[in-house]
Image: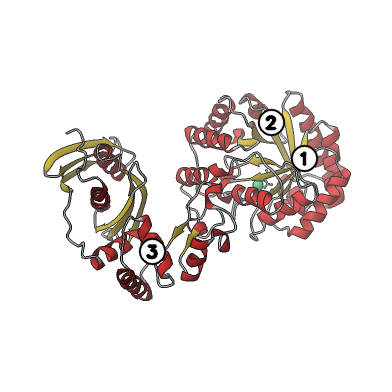
Amino acid sequence: MKNSEMIKIFDTTLRDGEQTPGVGLTPDEKLEIARTLDRLGVDTIEAGFPITSKGEIEGVRLIANEGLRAEIAALARAHKTDIDTAVSTGVKCVHVFIATSDIHLQHKLNMTRDEALQTAVKYVKYAKEHGVQVEFSAEDACRSDTEYLIKVLQGVSDAGADRIDIPDTVGVMHPVAMYNLISKVKNAISIPISIHCHNDFGLAVANSLAAVEAGAERVHCTINGLGERAGNASLEEVVMSLHNLYGKKTNINTRLIYEASKLVSRLTGIVVQPNKAIVGENAFGHESGIHTHGLLNMPLTYEPLEPELVGRKRWIQAGKHAGSHGIKAMLDQLAISVSDAQLKEIVARVKDLGDKGKRLTDADLESIADTVLGRVGEEKILQLVDLSVMTGTKSMPTASVKLLVDGKAYVVAETGVGPIDAAIKAIQKLGEGLGNIKLADYRLDAITGGTDALGEVSVKVEDKDGLVATAKATNEDVVVASVEAMIEGMNRLLLKRRVVQPKVAMPNP
Ligand code: KIV
Ligand code: ZN
């Protein structure tokens, strides 16, 4: 294996990823993701499967005409109309596929092996006549008879395919089997090989890496591992493993991985599991006292990668496993200074609450510290006087917030994607004149079930100098809880800042 080999990334978030049950992206959302994938450095963006709908044609066309650096591909069955539609969008690459397993041939295509071979060859030639790159996929390759599979791959290769892809369509391979299969294909075929793995047994990344070891040059993957059923090989795991464990290179700017993951999660509505490698909320979070102590001395003790390498920051959780080093580091980050005795008391209270099963946020830690330091009931610089929101299916959600800032009244109004967004934007507008205080993190939890559930909102706010404060509020009305948490967070931050700057700069009324 040559360690310096460059592996190409074929991103299929917008095609196989969009086939995740329940996901549907508008053409504009697809374009937004494509721009981010392009900045991320993927080599190919599979923008969609144009024959499926008018919106899909529009989305693929928008992406193909955006002048992106990446090669834009579209999927097409080995059918004339599929290929014509794909070509009409202006893509540079058509990804032509036909199944080669007996299961698919008998139960889906109703074709003999020979008919499928002839069809594959015919439509690869047809696609090539349109002057595009052609990547050919033998769907369900891994459950196909290997000799027949290789015959098909040789046929399409002779017909002019630029590269071939081996999909593990139902995710049934294991790494050794994958290594053996790709080695055989590599011996028989001279054009580049791609690998496309599904995650039904949780082995999509491992199988993709085994394929690369056996000579595959290109990996199909999706952001956050989205895709049919259990998903596809996740881009972030494939890329970080290739770089850090296999000594391979890709064109990916890994520092943009987290941003891409957040965007895809937001636009698809598919939440990333907290313990997901690389992009999960907990991937760089630490609670145990032993771990945080080691980590604060030398991050390598408990982190295999620097979080910044994938655009993230490490964080420490207060809880029953926490130790004084970790809590001290968290308090330092919140700009709260404590004596040794106060720290001991704070740690004891944290552990006590942790033992009672409480999940402690930064805001909880800050309020424990407030109590121990006797800062409860401190002066409020900002006070909520009134909040009104307007929302509906036809009108743009709008919020108007009346606040007192050091006793002087201000009214701020904004629109947003929903009433919470509008209200937070309105308050942030005021925050611009107060050291550019912005919402850095927001979390909404329902404490009880039912439509009258209490909503608990936790926020983290940050000013232009990187000073942070956290706060929490609970209310049956989640908009009110959000506004109260935001205002409390800003108050805490402003009070912290007053320690360094005696006077708060006033916003324009
Ligand atoms: O999983 C699969 O077989 C596919 C093909 C269309 C490449 O997504
Ligand atoms: Zn697939």
Question: What residue sits 77% from the left and 45% below the top?
Answer: 216
Q: Secondary structure at mark 2?
A: strand
Question: Where in the figure is residue 433, as x and y percent of width and height?
Answer: 25, 37
Question: Where in the figure is residue 424, as x and y percent of width and height?
Answer: 28, 43
Q: Secondary structure at mark 1?
A: strand
The residue to which callout 2 is attached is 93
The residue to which callout 1 is attached is 164
Left or right of 408 in this view: 169:
right
Residue 328's mark? Answer: 3
Q: Nearer the viewer, residue 502 or 35?
A: 502
Question: Where in the figure is residue 476, as x and y percent of width and height?
Answer: 24, 57
- Viewer can see residue 486: no
- Whether label 3 lies within 8 Å of ligand 2 gets the answer no
Q: Secondary structure at mark 3?
A: helix
The amino acid marked with disc number 3 is: Lys
**Image marks 3 and 2: residues in contact by CB distance under 8 Å:** no
Question: What residue sits 66% from the left and 36% below the top?
Answer: 43
Alpha-carbon span between mark 3 and mark 1:
55 Å
Front of the two marks 3 and 1: 3
**Label 1 neighbourhood size at 10 Å, few (<14), some (14-19), many (20+)?**
many
